[in-house]
Image (spheres, coloured by chain):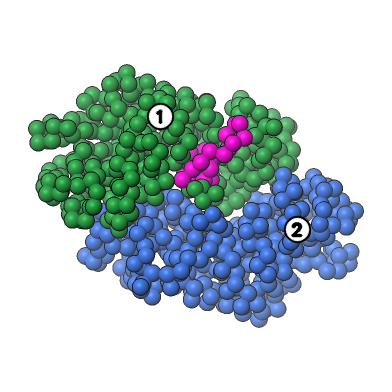
Chain colours: A blue, B green
Amino acid sequence: MSYLAQITSPTLVLSEGITRNNLQRMAIKAKNHGKKLVPHWKTSQSKEVGRWAREYGITEITCSSIKMAEYLSQEGWERIHIAFPFNVRELPRLNQLALRQRMSVQVVNPATAALLARELKAPIDFFIEIDAGYGRTGVQFSDSATIDSILSIASGCSNLEFRGFYLHPGHTYYGKDNLKIHQESRDALKSLKDRYIVQYPKLLTRLGDTPGCAVAEDFGEVDELGPGNFVFFDLMQVGLGSCNKEDIALCLAVPVVDIQLSRKEILIHGGGVHLAKDVLVQADGNKNFGEVVLLHDQGWTIPKHYSYVKSISQEHGIIQASEELLASIQVGDLLGILPVHSCMTADCMGFYLGLDGKIIDHAEGARL
Amino acid sequence: MSYLAQITSPTLVLSEGITRNNLQRMAIKAKNHGKKLVPHWKTSQSKEVGRWAREYGITEITCSSIKMAEYLSQEGWERIHIAFPFNVRELPRLNQLALRQRMSVQVVNPATAALLARELKAPIDFFIEIDAGYGRTGVQFSDSATIDSILSIASGCSNLEFRGFYLHPGHTYYGKDNLKIHQESRDALKSLKDRYIVQYPKLLTRLGDTPGCAVAEDFGEVDELGPGNFVFFDLMQVGLGSCNKEDIALCLAVPVVDIQLSRKEILIHGGGVHLAKDVLVQADGNKNFGEVVLLHDQGWTIPKHYSYVKSISQEHGIIQASEELLASIQVGDLLGILPVHSCMTADCMGFYLGLDGKIIDHAEGARL
C-alpha cells in the first residue's frame, strides 16, 4: 500500500533518499577539506535520521535545548553539544544527563560559568560562543576581558573543560555577502585560536551555518563545521543559493478541501500550526508560505507550472494555483507543500511519514 | 511551593482567574443579547478549560479539525462543531466519532455534501459556511445555486441534517471598520435566514469572531455567537481594541540566559517554537513578538516601563529592555512574555502551567 493511502490529515512526508544525499554530500565536503562535520540536529530532531547520519561518519551532533539533548542521548553519539547560551535553571537536568551522555554546553558570560563551576557534578566540556557581527548571541569577538574571565573561572573547576570557540554567523540568512561573512567569521576564529592555543593546545574552532557551509570552498583553519538545515534544506535555502529545490527532503502533504476556480485558489487543510509562519516575499511582492509539489507513490515531483501558498491562518492555507493545477485537482486530493523553513515545520509536526509508510521519530513527537 | 520554582525551561503559564473572567464576561454579554454562545475551542484546546466554561452555561463548542474534536469529545458537550470545510479524507474518523459524540461539520461545496450523503454511517448536522467578504473560505453569499445544490444533496440523506449558516468575518482582524463588517455579516445571515426559514424552520445562524463579538453591542437576528480568542485574548486583540492587556490570560515564562547592557538587550530561551512567529509592527516600525511582564507567586504584573521581544529565531528571543528592567534582571531569572497570538502559542506549547503549579491540558500535549 502506498504511503499516500495512509494520509487523511496534514502529514510531513520525508524522503530518506534525499536526506541521505544531503548528509553524504556535506560529509564528503567536510572530509575533502579535512574538517570534522558536527551538524546541528535541531532541524530533524530525530534519532532515526541520526542513525542514517552515522553511516556517513558523523559521530557528534549539536542541539539547542536540554530537552532535545535528553531525547537524542544514549543513541551512540560521542558527544552532544547544546548550542545555546546555557540556561542555569537547567543545571540539575544537565547534571543528570551528563551521567549517561558526554555533553558540551555553550557559555557567553561569567555568571553562567561561575554557576557551572560551582554546581557541576559530572564532567562536561564547554565552548565559548563568539559574536563576530551577527548580533544575536555570544561574547563580542573583541571582548577579551569576558573571554578571559570565563576561562579563569572554568580553570578552577575540574568538571568544566574548555573545548574551544563556537561561531554561528546567522547573518548569512539575510542573503548578503555570504562569502564575506564567512571569511570574517573564519578570521575571527583564527585570531582567537592563535591567541589561546598555547594555553589550550587542544582547543577547537567550530563554524556553523548552512548558507556558508553549503557555498564556501575555503574553510581555512576552522576545525569543525556545524551546519544544521542542510539535512533537509527548504525554500529559504533555495533562495539563499544553498541548494536546489530538488534537494529539499520533505514536504507537507495536505488535503484539498475546496477549490475556487474564479479566484484560482485551492483551499487546503494546512496552516500555521503545521507549516509554521515563516514566509518569503516573492519578486511580485506576494507572500509565499510554501510551494506546491505533486505527490506520487515514490515521492513527489516539482511541476513546471508554479503554484504556492499565498496565505495561512491557524489551520487554513490558500494556494494560488496555476491553470494546470486547477485543471487536474479535485476536492479530497492531496498536494505536497515544500516548506519555507523546514526546522520550524518539523517542530510543528512532531513526526515524519517515510515514503515506505513508516513513522520516523522527532523529539516533539516523543509523546506520540 | 510557588509555581515559579517548577519552571526551568520555557513554560506557558495560565491564569484561571483571568480566563474565568473572560468566559463569564462573554457569557453574560451573549445572554443579555439573547444569543447562544458557542465558542471556538481552537484557542485553549483544553478539556479542563472546557470544565470551567460549562460553569458559565456554555454547552457547545467549535473546533477546527477532527483531531481536536476527537480529543475534546465525551466531555459532556451537547455538540462539537468542526468549523473547517470538511475534509472528506477524514470521513471514516467522523463516522467513528459520531457514534460517541454529537457532531456538526461545515460544508462549502456539493462534492463534499455528496460524499457525506453517500458514506455517513451516523447522524450528523452541518452548517453551510458563508463568505460575505473575507475571501478565505465559504460559499459566496450571493451564490444561491451552490447553497441550493448542497441542500438538495443533503435532503436525500437521513444522516445529514441542515443546521444553518456559519459566518466567520475574519477580515475584522485587519482592524478596519469592524462594526461595518459586523453589520454586513449580520445582514448577510439575516437575508439567508429569511430566504430559507420556511423550508428549514429550525435553521440557525452563527457569527463568530472575537473582534466583532467583543466590541459590537447589536447582534440583530443572529442566533449564536462563535468567538474563540476571547478566552485568553492576546496582544493582537489589544491592538484591535477587543480587550485590555490585563485581560490576557496567559504568558510564556522564559529563562534569561544573557544580558547585553550596551545594546539594552536581554537574551531569553523562548523563540519561534514556543511563541510561534506571529508579529505586530509597532508605531516606531519595530517588530514586536511579545511584551514583557513581571512574574510573581500569584501571577504577573504589567510594568509601567515597556520592554518587548524584538526578534526571535527557532529557540532564541531578544528583548529590547527598558532601563528599569535591565537594572533589576539577572542571568537565571524568569520573565513573562504576553503573546501576540495566544492560539498559536498554546498550540506550540501543548500544555499550560496553572498558578497553583498544576498542569492544564491542551490537545497537542495529549501525548504528554
For residue B170, say whether it is visible: no
Residue A65 screen position, x and y as percent: 65, 54
Residue B107 screen position, x and y as percent: 23, 47
Circle 1 Cα neighbour tier, 10 Å, few/some/many (<14 / 14–19 / ≥20): some
A117 left or right, relative to B153: right
Residue appearing at x 39%, y 72% in the figure = A299
Circle 2 Cα neighbour tier, 10 Å, few/some/many (<14 / 14–19 / ≥20): many
Q: Which residue is mark 1?
A: B54
Q: Which residue is mark 2?
A: A98
Q: Which chain does the residue under circle 1 lie in?
A: B
Looking at the rendered structure, the secondary structure element under dot 2 is helix
Question: Between tags 1 and 2, which lies in front?
Answer: 1
Q: Nearer the viewer, residue B249 or A307?
A: B249
Q: Which chain does the residue under circle 2 lie in?
A: A
B264 left or right, relative to B135: right
Q: Which residues are magenta?
A: B338-363
A337 left or right, relative to A81: left
Q: Residue furthest top?
A: B32
Residue B98 screen position, x and y as percent: 30, 47
Does A201 lie within the magenta span?
no
The amino acid sitting under disc 1 is: Arg
B106 left or right, relative to B254: left
Q: Is B315 located above or below residue A291 in the figure?
A: above
Looking at the rendered structure, the secondary structure element under dot 1 is helix
Does B350 lie within the magenta span?
yes
Residue appearing at x 28%, y 30% in the figure = B224
Residue appearing at x 32%, y 63% in the figure = A334
